Amino acid sequence: MFRIRMMIGVLTVALVSGVGVTAAQTVDAATQEKLVELETRFKAADKNADGKLTLEEAKAGMPRVADAFSHIDAEKKGYVTLEQIKALMIKNAN
């Protein structure tokens, strides 16, 4: 559990992206900036622009997401979405 929290903490520090109004209202300015960067990095890593990152896409473009992939993809769908990563990031920022 500690290792997962540590990876998520590193993920939170390293990643960033834009969020919708609801999420933006619940995060501080520093987290908001990280969320903006996260969105940019997610879009760059999502090579087929389907709004989902496979483990392979994550490994190539977002290695910290790849490290926590099985935790983020709790439903074992084989992909993670930007919203899943944002939710986890916001949860761990509070």
Image (cartoon, helix red, strand yellow):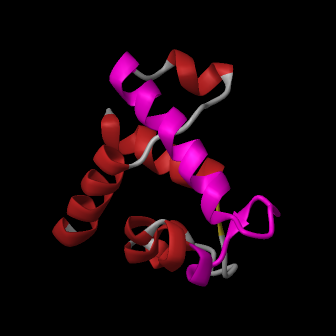
Residue 55, placed above or below residue 3: below
Q: Which residue is located at x 49 percent, y 78 percent?
A: 59
**Place of residue 11 in the rendered image (x, y in percent of width and height, measured from the top left):** 34, 55
Which range of residues does the magenta coloring cover?
28-57
**Place of residue 89 in the rendered image (x, y in percent of width and height, measured from the top left):** 42, 45
Q: Which residue is located at x 39 percent, y 17 percent?
A: 29
Location of residue 91 (image quadrant)? top left
Residue 70, placed above or below residue 10: below
Residue 43, placed above or below residue 30: below
Q: Which residue is located at x 46 percent, y 41 percent?
A: 16
Q: Is residue 31 left or right of residue 3?
A: right
Which part of the image, by quadrant, shows the C terminus?
top left
Dominant secondary structure (helix, strand or loop) of the stretch shown in magenta? helix
Q: Is 78 in front, or is 1?
A: 78
Residue 33 falls within the magenta-colored stretch: yes
**Place of residue 8 in the rendered image (x, y in percent of width and height, measured from the top left):** 32, 57
Location of residue 52 (image quadrant)? bottom right
**Place of residue 60 in the rendered image (x, y in percent of width and height, measured from the top left):** 52, 77
